[in-house]
Amino acid sequence: KRCSTLTRISISAGRWMNKIFCGVSRKHLQKYLDEFCFRWNHIEASSSIYDSVFHICTTTSASTYRSITNAVPGVSSDFNFGTVSYSA
């Protein structure tokens, strides 16, 4: 049961990223997954996503592009989760 739940969530994340963003690069993958988890948790908790976003925006400092991408030198790859295929 646990594996089926994880599989369902990973398939949902892949579909969401492909539908909304037409795939994502490895450089930004973790942040997109973080956003998906944030949204998933709010759906599961039935709480207001707007209240949470407002609270986060008013209580945290701004992020730089470098801190968001956490770039790894020499690593560049685009992912497409629709068919669980990616180019490396």
Image (cartoon, grey):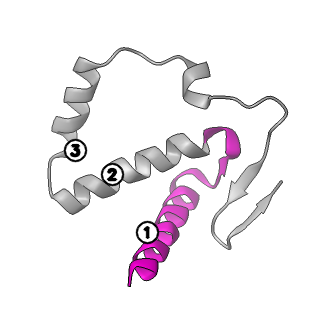
- 10 Å neighbourhood of mark 3: few (<14), some, or many (≥20)? some
- Which label is found at residue 22? none
Q: Residue visible at 38% across and 85% down?
A: 1
Q: Do the numbered discs 3 and 2 sit on residues whose CB atoms are within 8 Å?
A: yes
Amino acid on which disc 3 is placed: Ile
Amino acid on which disc 2 is placed: Arg
Q: Residue visible at 42% across and 52% down?
A: 36
SS at circle 2:
helix
Residue 61, quarter of picture: top left
Q: CA–CA distance between discs 3 and 1?
A: 19 Å
Amino acid on which disc 1 is placed: Ile
- 10 Å neighbourhood of mark 2: few (<14), some, or many (≥20)? few
Residue wearing tag 2: 39
Question: If you read the primary sequence from the N terminus, does the residue marked by circle 3 or circle 1 appear first?
Answer: 1
Residue wearing tag 1: 9
Residue 29 in the figure: left or right of residue 52: right
- Tell which tag, 1 or 2, sits nearer the viewer: 1
Image location of residue 21, percent across then percent down: 57, 50
Image location of residue 53, percent across then percent down: 25, 34
Check residue 18 for magenta coloring.
yes
SS at circle 3:
helix
Q: Quadrant of the C terminus?
A: bottom right
SS at circle 1:
helix
Question: If you read the primary sequence from the N terminus, does the residue marked by circle 3 or circle 2 appear first?
Answer: 2
Residue wearing tag 3: 49
Q: CA–CA distance between discs 3 and 2?
A: 7 Å
Image location of residue 13, percent across then percent down: 49, 62
Residue 53 in the figure: left or right of residue 26: left
Q: Main secondary structure of the magenta part?
A: helix
Q: Which region is colored magenta? A: 1-28
